[in-house]
Image: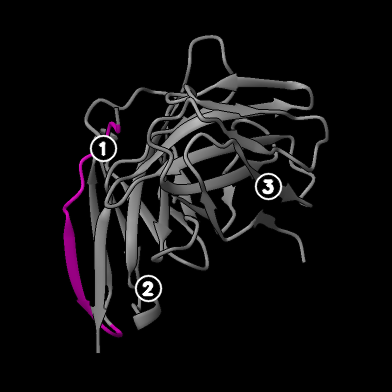
Amino acid sequence: DGGITQSPKYLFRKEGQNVTLSCEQNLNHDAMYWYRQDPGQGLRLIYYSQIVNDFQKGDIAEGYSVSREKKESFPLTVTSAQKNPTAFYLCASSFTGDQPQHFGDGTRLSIL
Amino acid sequence: DAKTTQPTSMDCAEGRAANLPCNHSTISGNEYVYWYRQIHSQGPQYIIHGLKNNETNEMASLIITEDRKSSTLILPHATLRDTAVYYCIVRGFDRGSTLGRLYFGRGTQLTVWP
């Protein structure tokens, strides 16, 4: 089945540690996105990529980094510079930048 | 800037039509209206989108007013599984970009009761 896989579903991080969230898609989509969702809030865009080896900052990129070395993969690293990393992280993809986005089931990150 | 206004919550009886309103009075001519829904602790699910004509698919219908300042998502026969937060989104394009940005607001919590 085609889809977007995010792993792990739950992730715990100690203060001062970097952590990487995985996002893989087998939909042959060119564009991929990372969002953050806080309790009771809508989604906010962190980073997006329209094509391999290219990505742009979204609205809340500070403290995060990404890479897009393969079409299928768009990992997100939450660095120690992110002061409030506890949130629900969602990855999405679309055929092109103007097509509907399809989402994974998210990773919930918590700080120990 | 979410660009849309939705009621915080709505209720609907199972088997009845659920009509979810959305105001987007500042929408531009080339901006689409998108609807997604999110069941607790899952990723948002794409439902439907449109520009100015009414649209229908296997999940729902989208009615957009002629002036495009508001729209209504219709779930024709709501079931308990339709209980979710529904997001009405205006898809905008940053200057010089071909990537349509989704601006999520807080959405409408739809509760379908037996």
Q: Is residue A103 magenta?
A: no
User: Foreground: A44 or B90?
Assistant: A44
Q: Is residue B10 magenta?
A: yes
User: Foreground: B47 or A61?
Assistant: A61
Q: Is residue A106 visible?
A: no
| Crowdedness near tag 2: few (<14), some (14–19) or many (≥20) residues, C-alpha within 10 Å | some
Q: To which residue does mark 2 refer? A: B82
Kind of residue at disc 2: Asp
Question: Residue B4's mark?
Answer: 1
Up/down of A64 relative to B22, above or below: above
Which of disc 1 and disc 2 is earlier in sequence? 1
Marks 3 and 1: which is nearer the front?
A: 3
Up/down of B48 relative to B80, above or below: above
In the image, taking residue A96 as reference, residue B35 lies left or right, namely left
Q: Residue at x 43, y 39 (%)?
A: A85
- Quarter residue A99 falls in: top right
User: Foreground: B88 or A104?
Assistant: A104
Q: To which residue does mark 3 refer? A: A23
Q: Is residue A104 visible?
A: yes
Q: Residue at x 68, y 56 (%)?
A: A5
How are the residues colored? Answer: one colour
Looking at the rendering, the stretch of residues picked out in magenta corresponds to B2-15
Image mark 3: chain? A
Rendering coords of residue B41 (x, y %): 43, 63
